[in-house]
Amino acid sequence: MVKAYLVNHTHWDREWYFSIMDEQVLGEQLFTEVLDELEKNHEANFCLDGQVSIVDEYVAIHPEAKQRINKLVDEGRLFVGPWYTQTDALMPQAESIIRNLVIGIKDTQKNYGRPMMVGYLPDSFGFNAQMPTLLHQVGIDSFVFWRGTNFKRQTNSVYFRWRGLSGKEVIALNFPFGYFTGQITPEAKKKLNEFVTQRYDPAVKFEAEHGNHEDVLVPSGIDQMNIVKNMAQTVLALNAKSNYHTKISSYPEFVALMRKKKAALPDYQGELRLPTYSRVHRSIGSVRSKFKRANFKLEQKLLTRVEPLCVIGKKVGINIGNGLLEKAWQKLLKCQPHDSLGGSVSESAAKDIWHRYKEVNELTDGIENMIKKKIAQYLKLTAYQVLIFNTDPHRFSGYKEIEIVVPTKNIQLEGMVDNEIISEKYIAPRKHILMQTPHGEDYTDEPGYYKLKIKGRVDLPGLGYKVIKIHNTDKALAEITSSQIKSSGEISFKKQKLQFVNGQINLLTPKKKYMNIISLVDQPNDGDTYDFSPYRDFTEQRLPLENVAIRHSLHHDVMIIRGSASLPLNLNDYDVDKPHYGKLDYILNFTFNNLGQICAKLVLNNHVNSHRLRLRFNPLINTQEVRAQIQAGYITTTNHKIAKDWNKEFVEKPVNLYNFTKSVTLRENGRHFTFWGAGQKEYEYRNNQLFITLMATTGELGKPNLTWRPGRASGDTTSQGHIMMPTLSAQELGRNEFEFCFGLFDTDFNESQNNQLTASWLAANISYQAQTLNMFINRLDNKIWSTENNPQIDDQLELINLPEKIRVAAIYPALSEERSYVIRLENLTNRPISIPEVLLKKGKIVNALENAIDERKIGPYDLISVILPLE
């Protein structure tokens, strides 16, 4: 006989159409009632949605409840963790997902007891193919979820073994009817017979039949729903009416049961984002694009700047507490749940998200400022010396950018060559400026000065710093110069030329001429903050490019192309005789780098509502496959034929829009084209052209009956008693900036080489100059006072130098050992890589929780962590 395992839980969106403060009001009442009910009825248990952040916020309001929570967790009746927040699983980087688990598990262990070691994500909008690999980083071997499955196309079982690209697998447990499958409300108790016959038993039957299971998992709960009162009596009444036997259970108990049956479960590898039984919002990577770019930038800032700087600082005696770094990560992770990072939130919640981004920026900038100035103080640097950092564990030889303040441009840099001013700003003199001197207050006149950004070639130690010197000379540094605005122009690198002529951009290589290699295309968007939706039969139009100017440089010239377009201001303006128009103004900057990539920046001034803007590339590569970089690996995507009657199988159109993290590649006959994005998350490959979404703007949180998404509005805005909610900020009016890179290469695509190109493009430029002319170049400089008895340190430092082929996902101070740091190695190739001997000799191989493991190689598309002493 089929047995149903009923798990009582609540699903807890931290923010949505309500705000964080709204959520805490709801939680303050509900969580108290949960504790009361669990203490009253010992047969009951409850899952707090698998995220510990909401428990922390409740305990901050009710500190007296912590002891009650500890007891219930210890009894195995209240389940907390393992996540810090319920992460989106498609758009954050792999390291963000790992940190979410590490912080959530450590937080739970420290404050509440044993975390629920189940990979529980009940409501995220689909899942990347590497989730099993990422869960194994913290020792989790199970995954409980709702959305993204298709039992005809993937596996005909609600329970299966899900393999990551690494080959590591988890037991995947799906509830096809959602986390509210067995939702027992007070009304359902009153109409129990109806609930059982029309909802409960059909769901149990479906789960049992899809995989021939004798034991099935039935979640009971919904958004912000309270604990089921008198659960034991409720289950007795349920069993009296049901065709199946139900018992009170928990996710860990059911996972343990399925572990015993693991060998008999079918196998699956790949992503989970088919909209068969529930929506996955395949185009949510388009909306509120500013959120995505801000999140990407902060991930990069933490991983490539601040955390490695903390390791360097710790080496020389600057001990930034791990609590500050954790606080920065916590605030960023609060921006990464599916609704938050997806952008399907109200205006009030959007303001909260932007405020958290602001706070993370301030925390990380402040930490960086503190470390750089303290090192400068230890070295007794003057304003004529500059610290340059390398936060990669490889020695560096190439071009870096530094920022300095000097009274004249007649300078020379010792220790850096081929120097050129790439941007400058002159600050006029000021009079009667207050000075603090040993004899008291004094006044002086402050001279004018230049704020310069300089690019030059430099050699740097691995994971360390060096000092270069500034000398006054009688000759000014070289500067970029600009040509007049023209109708045509070109820049070149080796045997490649990027050309603007006749209003289009062409790329010329020794073997081919790629006409119209890149263009901007736009179309109206009838969607909402969940999805793009085409508007009637209006298709994409190419936006005009008008003129060009060239900035001539010692290194690589810069091509500046301008354009503008007048488009219908709102959707209804497409249908009237006398429409209102809005303006798009845009500037595209292109330059080659030394690696053959074409680096670009687009500055867009947007004054048009409800439209989608994309990049269109025409690389003349004929292929059916796209190789996309995702979290800790690469997947190959191909377009699927979509039936005209697709809505018979799917609840939203399974459009051929895919997600990526950093790069997308097309390959054919010994050549390839690659796009690298800085926060762009969505691509489409169609008719041999690659489209990268930049933005899809909208003024609605949710809309019903979209072309690609028939029926109700997402976000419950058309549910009974709900209202439509405008989202003006999701129109993303005003200035928008996008950075990206692309390149055509006459070689076979190689993942290892692509990883190096990606890392080089994203590598940080970090420098510091002791300030006398402007104490606000770095915001905290004027409050970081010199101290006595500073340690004596060398003016050059190298912590480690790893082989160039070894890629690193993160470097940060260890959580478990003082005077130690963690290097997380990643293998983004399909072959195993040996761990470098220097790490095996000096370090300890661990998982992400810093527990020792027995490994000597990094498997394909896998990660390994190493704890190293700061000797």
Image (cartoon, grey):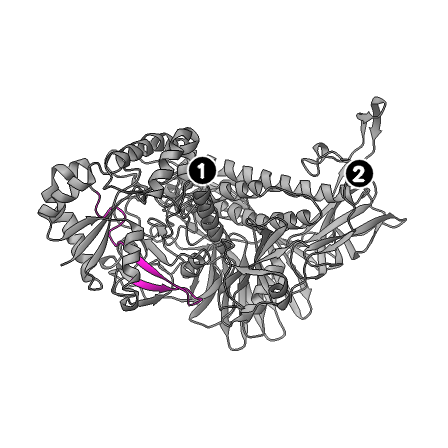
When the figure is inspected, residue 634 is found, relative to residue 311, above or below; the finding is below
Q: Position of residue 16 (x, y in %)?
A: 37, 39
Q: Nearer the viewer, residue 124 or 75?
A: 75
Q: Is residue 179 magenta?
A: yes
**Left or right of residue 284: residue 667:** right
Describe the element under mark 2 as helix, strand or loop.
Answer: strand
How far apart are the two marked residues, 1 and 2, measured between alpha carbons? Answer: 40 Å
Q: Nearer the viewer, residue 640 or 392?
A: 392
Dot 2 alpha-carbon crowd within 10 angstroms: few under 14, some 14 to 19, many 20 or more = some
Q: Give the residue pinned by disc 1.
A: 350
The kind of residue tagged 2 is Tyr
Viewer-nearest of labels 1 and 2?
1
Q: Position of residue 806 (x, y in %)?
A: 60, 65
Magenta residues span: 160-183
Q: Earlier in the sequence, mark 1 or mark 2?
A: 1
Q: Give the residue pinned by disc 2.
A: 449
Q: Is residue 89 magenta?
A: no
Split into 4 quadrants, where in the image is the N terminus? bottom left
Q: Quadrant of residue 688?
A: bottom left
**Left or right of residue 488: residue 66:** left
Dot 1 alpha-carbon crowd within 10 angstroms: few under 14, some 14 to 19, many 20 or more = many
Q: Quadrant of residue 319?
A: top right
Residue at 21% of width from left, 58% of height from top?
A: 215
Split into 4 quadrants, where in the image is the C terminus? bottom right
Q: Position of residue 217 (x, y in %)?
A: 24, 53
